[in-house]
Structure formats: C-alpha cells, structure tokens
Image (cartoon, helix red, strand yellow):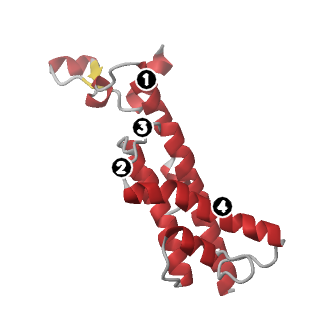
Amino acid sequence: MIEAWAWLEAQGLLVPAEDISNSRGWRQLSRRAKKFEDETDFAKYAVARTLPKEALHPRIAKKVWMAFMRGEFDVAVFQAMKAVEVAVRAATNIPELGVKLMRSAFKPDNGPLTDMTVEPGERSARMELFAGAIGSYKNPHSHRDVTLDNPAEALEVILLANHLMRIVESRCQTMSS
C-alpha cells in the first residue's frame, strides 16, 4: 500500500492538501488526477508516461515530449516527423518536400545520404523506409486534421521518427569524415 501511495505522489496524482490538515500529512487528488473520468483515461496516462524525454533525439526531445505529455498525440507525431524532413533537407540541401525529398536523399545509386557500403536492396529499403514514414505519418497531418488519440500508437511513431533522426545524424557524420 505504501508503495502505491508513493507512486501516486511521484506521478503528481496525489498532492499535499491545501488546508490546515496538511501539517498532518493529508493528501488530495491533483488537478491531473481529477481529470480521469474512467479507467481508459488512466490507461492512456500510464502509456504516455512511458516516453522518456532523455531517450529522444535532442532535436525532437523538448517539443515532441511536451506535446505527447499534454496528450496532443497528433501534434507530437507531426512534430517528430517534420523534424525528420527538416533534418534530411538540411543535410542534403535538396529543395524538395516530403516523399520526393526522401527518395532523392536516399536514392539507392547516388543519394547524398545513401550508405553505399550496403547491398543495393538495403539501400532501396532505407529509401522506402524514409519515404514511407514521411508519406504515412507526416504528410497526412500536413494536409488535413488527423485524429490520433491512442498514446501507444503515437509512441511507436515518435520512436520511429527518433530512429530516423539518428540515421540521418549517423549518415551526416559519415559524410563529414
């Protein structure tokens, strides 16, 4: 019981009571805890807590993590994927957008971010990975309202964007050495 109580306090769900009884250690539900209307709301909160800010690439950590923690999952996903597109454009100086940019940057035969040390099939797969991620998760959010209220799905897409950011960073380091 004590461990559960400590967990609730650590998560900011129990806070010191605002009245005089606080001197006796009384606690009350926080504003965040009072927003939970049912078990589904709490389950979403629990999943949202699984995204450690320090695990995210520095270029997306603050903006994406804050949106995710606020429950703005569509915004977090868009920001993460937009950061991938911006990073690829900055690394290549290719003036294209979206999927076309990814296909040019990772073109299997001569893309500026293509790893020529791997097999041609793997180079094509990398190009398709970037193009598919941008086409599936960034472009829809750019052109219409996309409802994304599942924190687990948002988490997966954010982690994909995080991985893509690390690939771009790695390719840039390889190109400069």
Considering the image in quadrants, where does the C terminus appear? Answer: bottom right
| Number of marks | 4
Question: Are dots 1 and 2 in contact, CB under 8 Å?
Answer: no
Instruction: Kindly report which numbered mark, 1 or 2, lies closer to the viewer in this rendering.
Output: 2
Q: Going 40% across and 60% down the picture, which residue do you hit? A: 142
**Mark 3 lies on residue:** 149
Q: Where is residue 39 shown, x and y percent of the image?
A: 42, 19
Q: Going 37% across and 53% down the picture, which residue do you hit? A: 144
Q: Going 71% across and 84% down the picture, which residue do you hit? A: 110
Most extreme residue toward the right, as rendered? 119
Q: Where is residue 176 shown, x and y percent of the image?
A: 65, 86
What element does badge 2 sit on?
Answer: loop
Viewer-proximal residue among 15 and 153: 153
Say the numbered circle drawn on residue 145: 2
Report how far apart the C-alphas of labels 3 and 1 lie in the structure: 11 Å
- Neighbour class for label 1 at 10 Å: few (<14), some, many (≥20)? few
**Mark 1 lies on residue:** 40
User: Against 155, is 82 above or below?
Assistant: below
Question: Are dots 4 and 1 in contact, CB under 8 Å?
Answer: no
